[in-house]
Amino acid sequence: MQQSYTRNLVRVFSLLFYKIAPVLSLLRTIGEKYGRTPAQVALNWLVAQGNVIPIVGVKNAEQVKQNVGAFSWKLTDNGLGKLDKTTRP
């Protein structure tokens, strides 16, 4: 039974990664363009949607700095459009 559960879990995670890989790649690409981390790009994109308020958790001062860095710049319409298109089902 444990092997079946593990095999199914691996299959599900593989499928999920396959679906989010393009999004992760785009977040990295945009981040490199702006000198930001993928997480900073993701937070910026979520806030730019206007109807989303991300709730981020932090455990140390470095994480606070990283999160603040998500809001001191603005994604272009092109970047927003690419993220919107890539994340659509």
Image (spheres, grey):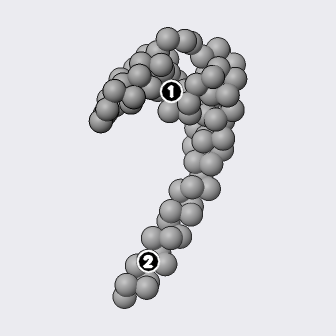
Q: How many numbered marks, from 0 up?
A: 2
Q: Which residue is drawn at 31% across and 32% down?
A: 60
> Which of the labelled discs sits on residue 48, or is there none?
none
User: How far is mark 1 from mark 2, CA to CA?
Assistant: 33 Å
Tell me which label, 1 or 2, sits earlier in the chain: 2
Where in the figure is residue 43, as x and y percent of width and height?
46, 26
Residue 85, percent across and down? 64, 32
Q: Quadrant of residue 4?
A: bottom left
- Tell me the kind of residue under disc 1: Gln
40 on left or right of 83: left
The picture places residue 20, in percent across and down from the top left corner, at: 58, 48
> On the rendered structure, is 63 left or right of 25?
left
> What secondary structure is marked by label 2?
helix
Task: Kindly report which numbered mark, 1 or 2, lies closer to the viewer in this rendering.
Answer: 1
**Badge 2 amino acid:** Thr
Q: Residues within 10 Å of mark 2 (few under 14, many from 20)?
A: few
Coordinates of residue 23 in the picture (x, y in percent): 61, 40
Q: In which quarter of the image is the N terminus?
A: bottom left
The answer to whether residue 27 of the structure is visible from this angle is yes
Q: In which quarter of the image is residue 2?
A: bottom left
Local SS, label 1? helix
Residue for badge 2: 6
* Residue beneath disc 1: 40
Above or below: residue 21 compared with residue 11: above
Q: Residue at x 66, y 41 (%)?
A: 25
